[in-house]
Amino acid sequence: MSNTRCGFIMVWAVCLGSYAFAQTTEKLQGLNADLAGLEQSTLLSRGEVGLWVQEVESGNVLVNYKANRSFMPASNLKLITTATALEVLGSDYRYKTKGYYTGKLDSTGVLDGNLVVVGSGDPSLGSDQYNVKISDLMSTWSESLQKQGIKQVTGDLYVDVSAYDANPVPDFWPWADLGNYYGAGIYGLNLSDNTVKLYFQQNRTLADPVKLLRSEPDMKGVSYTNGVVTGPEGSKDEAYIYGAPFQNNRMILGTLPPGDGEYKVKGSMPDPPAWFGHLLKQALKAKGIVLKGTVKVSATPRKTSGAKLWFDYQSPTLAELARNTNFFSINLYAESIFQQIALAKTGKGDREKAIHEVKRFWSSVGIDTLGWILMDGSGLSPLNAISPEQMGKVLRYMAKDAKASTAFVASLPKAGKDGTVYWFGKNTALENNAQLKSGSFTGTLCYSGYMITKSNKRVAFSIMMNRYEGEMRAAAKKLLPLLEKVADF
């Protein structure tokens, strides 16, 4: 090849590179202007937005708009929780719930001892996310005891919940959330998503009382003061259940949409471990095993040395649990996974220890955690804080350097297709391209994840908006064009 031709190719390549750089610069300037314009709009005139976009492979930062500021992440915090757990515990980690019996069994089938069930905080036990009913599990466990010749137990049934904090809910969770399913407490033993389903009979008369028909399960001693009325045409479910853990009287206020059928509202169980013990006692009875003692929930560890193993139940893998956590934004799963990090590392599922372990891990791999405020693992607390830059760097690490990279990325739903973002980005460059987690509560909306840009670059991004005024989907419509422009880079 002649020197003249080589020189032409080099000049052409430089010109092409300069043109591409100029195009990127122009797009960046336009995106920054759009972000600044959004902050001047009526939607966000008293709030702010931050955006971080970084190429996964090269580490080049494409967008940094107020990305070093701390924002309330809402459910985007689940990305930090699941990423940490997958790296610290491993993708194949499983929770274990174990049953034991103590004492001596005589020739007539009388066990002079106790039954002990030791919980591990498994959030999937009897969960609606899996096709394993708690009643079926308990039937199997009871049958196992029956096959060992046990017909009567003279002692008590202990439900050991010592694995986790004695306080089932994190400090600073909003009062209005605690009685609802997404504010359910987290215990050393959970079951059926710690959820109760309330069924109402709708009517079509504005402001008329809506009759509460039944609760499933129907827990003895739990009552509801019902103040729900019918809302206007076109209204949505605005009914809220008020009540804290261990409070057996719940108040229900708000409105339900007009209609003629039954309407389901999900709330939190007041005391899941006690309900677990009640159900297991009934399952034992159904198999002909009489428990002479009572159900006792123990916040201190029960001694099992010398006891005989009754059952050993294992959860799905952490990779599967993380996927459900991020696809469907399940607070109970996230909180359990958060506390499980501390349990595995320190022997106690304590929230303060979990906070320390999460920050310690990310600091160890070079992520700056200054300004991280962690109050829980799900993002439900409005006091959580993290910057889009920190979130973006965690995402880049998980895509590029993490042992659990495959499991983590697979846990993110695809825009316009899956989970809580099934509607977001439909018929745009994001659909079936961006893998992202949404996060929202009043005045807060965030999206963080990955996408492939027009120039075939894989990027990690995090956009966070705090203190906006208006409906969530209206706010989402303002953020979507910004992410479309990222896809166009």
Image: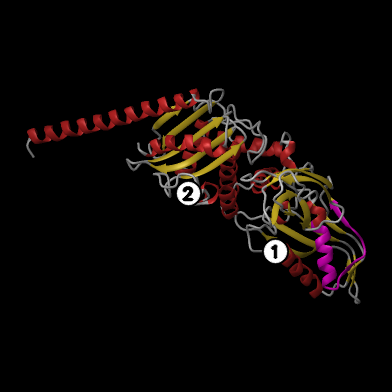
Give the vertical position of 254 relative to 20 (above or below).
below
Answer above or below: position of 223 versus 67: below
Q: Is residue 164 left or right of residue 300?
A: left
Image-quadrant location for residue 99: bottom right
Q: Is residue 223 magenta?
A: no
**To which residue does mark 1 refer?**
133
Give how far across and how far down residue 383 sits, in percent: 66, 31
Q: Position of residue 168 (x, y in %)?
A: 76, 43
Is disc 1 placed on a helix, strand or loop?
loop
Q: Position of residue 43 (x, y in %)?
A: 53, 28
Image point (93%, 64%), residue name: 292
Question: Could you classify mark 2 by the number of other residues whose Cα lies within 10 Å: few (under 14), some (14-19), or many (20 or more)?
Answer: many
Front residue of 51 and 118: 51
Q: Is residue 27 shown to the viewer in this render?
A: yes
Residue 67 horizontal/vertical position (percent): 49, 28
- For badge 1, the amino acid type reads Lys
Q: Which residue is mark 2?
A: 414
How far apart are the alpha carbons under marks 2 and 1? 29 Å
Identify which amino acid the numbered label 2 is placed on: Lys
Image-quadrant location for residue 445: top right
Give the magenta part as a residue range: 276-297
Indicate yes or no whether the magenta region holds residue 289: yes
Residue at the far front in the pictured view? 205
- Name the one closer to the observer, 270 or 170: 270
Give the answer, above or below, for where 173 lies relative to 303.
above
Quarter of the C terminus within the rendering:
top left
Label 1, residues with CA under 10 Å away: few <14, some 14-19, many ≥20: some
Could you say which is closer to the camera, residue 474 or residue 145? 474
